[in-house]
Structure formats: structure tokens, C-alpha cells
Amino acid sequence: MDPGQPVYGLQTPNLDGGEPFPESIEEMAAVCVRELRAVQPAGPYHLMGWSFGGNVVQEVAVQLQEAGEQVALLAILDAFPLAPLDDLDNADRDTVFRALLSNMGVGEEDLGQEGPVEAGAVRDAFRRSGSPLGSLEPAVIDAMVDNFAGQARLMRTYTPRRFEGPALFFTATEGRPAGTFGLGLWAPYISGPVENHDVACAHAQMMRPDARARIGTTLAAALGAGHDTTQGETR
């Protein structure tokens, strides 16, 4: 992307333990809107969300439209308006921890320990793999587990509202069971069109360098940087 294009990342509100977990995705999105408008008071806004964040950012876009603001770009990375199928919101903490690690590409062999997973061992595994998550304190890694389960609970009771406009969608194609999910799930909630771009990676790998290069090129084109946008498939 253009080096002059600023990128702001919005953190889950309670990741540092200073805030209670939101009661709804709408509440979480409202926090994001407040933080976003503190940096940029008025539109047009360019928004992107990955995984659970894709559901949050779609609600952020709706709230901004309701406030009379222009959303010039809504990009969703491999996220679907569908409650989780793994029942992790009802699982014990160790099971949730292991699922979170697996989702981030950390396997049992990487932990180097037996018994319940501890945050310190997770941090060490991240460090050995070169992940920037290895810089986190164990308390923050523990908070990530709580967030992971909490996000699953929020999805159980969430029905998206309708965003009026098009969207860019990025599908992680590797490790994807045949027939799983589909862009049609967004049809009631995004007026469209929804332009799909396949990314040759697993869901948890969408911020790795090769995947970022594919995504960034497409975003640059959408932001008017002069790149070809004809590779996408509109659905």
C-alpha cells in the first residue's frame, strides 16, 4: 500500500484487563467507533476486519452510516455472520486455550509441556516461532483466552444489521472443508455487491507476509492507488 496511507489498529477493549467484556457486538462496535472518531472525526472512512473482527467492523460501518457518515470502503477478511460450531463458549479453559493456539498455528509439540496450558509456556512458544505475540505478558495472553470464549458467546446472540453499500471480501482458501460457509450468508446484511478475492492461506495466516501482500495490493487498488482490480469475483 501507499506509504502515506495510515493504518490504525483497534484493540479488543478489555485485553489489558482494564475494561469489562462488552455485553454485545453492538457495544463493542460503539467503542471502536468512539476510538476511530477520536482520530478521524468525519468520513469518508475505510474499514477492515478479520475473523470475529469482520463481524465487528460490519457493525461499525452500520453505526457510522446511522451517524450520517460515509463509509468509502468496507473490507472483511474471512468472517461470516454465523455462530461458532465448536461450542468453545461452553468449554473449559484449557480446551479454549488449546483451540486459540491451534487457530494461531501453535501445535501441541510447540508448547513443550504436559498438563494444562499455562500462559508462560504459550509466550515461550510464540517467541520460538518468531511471532510478535511473544512480546506479550502472560496476563495479556490469559486475557486473550477470555476474549476468545467471550467472542463466541456474543456471536450466539448476534444478528447483523444491514450495511448499505458494497464490500471487499477475502477468502482464506487453504484448510477449508468443501461447502463450508459462503458469501451468501452476508446477502441479507450487505446491500452489495460483495467482491471476493481468494487468498492462498489458512484462516489464521491472513496477516502473514505473503497473504498481506495479496490483500494489500487489492486494498491499494480499492483506495485508488492505480492497481488492477479485475482479479476479484463478484457474488
Image (cartoon, helix red, strand yellow):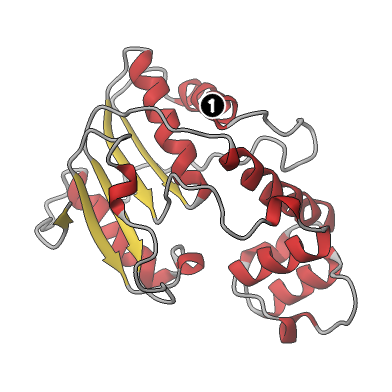
Q: Is residue 166 left or right of residue 109?
A: left
| Residue under the point 23% across and 56% down | 196
**Residue 119 placement (x, y as % from top left):** 83, 64
**Residue 95 placement (x, y as % from top left):** 77, 65
Residue type at tag 1? Glu
Rendered view: 92 above or below 105? above
Q: Quadrant of residue 30?
A: top right
Q: Residue furthest top?
A: 68
User: Which quadrant does the N terminus fall into?
Assistant: bottom left
Q: Which residue is mark 1?
A: 26
Q: How many marks?
A: 1
**Residue 34 placement (x, y as % from top left):** 53, 21
Rendered view: 110 above or below 91? below
Secondary structure under tag 1 reads: helix
Rendered view: 87 above or below 35? below
**Residue 144 placement (x, y as % from top left):** 72, 52
Rendered view: 150 above or below 202? above
Towards the viewer: 180 or 229: 180
